[in-house]
Image (cartoon, helix red, strand yellow):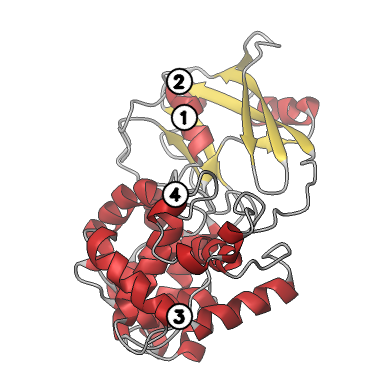
Amino acid sequence: MSLFAARLLSWFDRHGRHDLPWQHPRSAYRVWISEIMLQQTRVEAVIPYFQAFMARLPDVRALAGAPLDEVLHLWSGLGYYARARNLHRAARLVQERHGGELPAERAALEALPGIGRSTAAAILAQAHGQPEAILDGNVRRVLARHAAVEGWPGSTAVQSRLWELAEARLPRERMGDYTQAIMDLGATVCRRTQPACQRCPVASDCAALAQGRTSDLPTPRPGRALPLRTRWAALVIAPAGVYLERREPAGIWGGLYSMPEAEQPEDLRDAVLSRWTHAREEARNTGDRIAHVFSHYRLDLRILRFRLPAAACGIMEGGGSIWYNSRLPVRVGLPAPIERFLKDQGTIDNGANR
């Protein structure tokens, strides 16, 4: 066993996280779901989502047989919804090709939607004890500091070097614990800011600490200003609820339900008033808007309000659109910013559709 791994495992036994819900039991399915949820998301935020997901969809068969709307509903608020769509697709492929059991070979796992090298390795190491290295954000930070690796970890050359370091430090046993340990070290000790080096089990030979460079490494991504994108959304309110449409399967908020949108307010206004001739547009320039930051742009979603009389709408529109309100039993996924906005307007009771 490498000296790095021995020290890390000794630290994990005393200070690691041993009560995470996906550790009991540490099955391939539970590890898979947790790993996908944990991408770009903190453990504390994931735990309640994971527990709710497991309560409804406890195995591959249940996930494969569930409607996509239900999966997206359970995912609502976690963001990066392509993860949920890929989970659903992958579960159906596992059901078709592998008899409902996640394969225990890296190549077969990586052939599934949404599973890359690090996620496949995490499943194999934690569920099967296989000697596989992972390289998530926490691990990249630990290794980049410990070996003083220069350069942005997202670049091909730096990532290749970090994979070499990750594989060289693997133990010969306790792969599941080691995998959790190195993730825990990055999350709780070797933090992005203010790392607790005095509590680190591998501080004695950490090159970044010796060089006084823990705040410089890993090298940040080259800066770039996010462009601002302005769009318009229609808040169409009727006694039946708020009109929502299912978005296209791909792209931002793919497959979720949201308000109709357009690039220009005139186009949106014409579309609404031509569809519902009885619609009454409420006062313009109310200032209602939704601001949200995505990974590659900032969204400024400005709201036009319309109100319909009871006779102008039905309970369900069909064809990928609904009237959404607290009395409907339908369970669908909404983008978190849209759901927050609707709740703030008093158009959806808090938790009514969960």
Task: Residue at 36%, 67% (x, y): give it.
Answer: 181
Q: Tag 3 or tag 2, which sits nearer the N-term?
A: 3
> Looking at the image, how many numbered discs can be counted on the residues?
4
**Residue beneath disc 2:** 344
Q: Amino acid at mark 3?
A: Ala
Q: Nearer the viewer, mark 1 or mark 4?
A: 4
Q: Position of residue 151 (x, y in %)?
A: 73, 64
Q: Secondary structure at mark 1?
A: helix
Q: Is residue 340 visible?
A: yes
In primary-sequence order, the first of circles 4 and 3 is 3
Q: Are marks 4 and 3 in contact (CB under 8 Å)?
A: no
Q: Is residue 242 left or right of residue 328?
A: right
Residue under circle 1? Answer: 340
Answer few, some or many: residues within 10 Å of disc 4's Cα (few below 14, many 20 plus, some between 14 and 19).
few
**Label 4 to label 3, Cα distance in Å?**
27 Å
Question: Dot 1, crowdedness within 10 Å: few (<14), some or many (≥20)?
Answer: some
Task: Give the residue type that dot 1 points to.
Answer: Arg
Q: Which residue is mark 3?
A: 121
- The alpha-carbon separation of the residues under discs 2 and 4 comes to 40 Å
Q: Which residue is mark 4?
A: 196
Q: Residue at x 47, y 72 (%)?
A: 89
Secondary structure state at the residue bearing disc 3 = helix
At 39% from the left and 64% from the top, the residue drawn is 201
Distance from label 2 to label 3 (Cα)? Answer: 42 Å
Give above or below for 116 relative to 47: below
Whichever of labels 2 and 4 marks the residue nearer the N terminus, that label is 4
Q: Amino acid at mark 2?
A: Asp
Q: In the rendered view, would you say 130 is above or below 160? A: below
Q: Amino acid at mark 4?
A: Ala
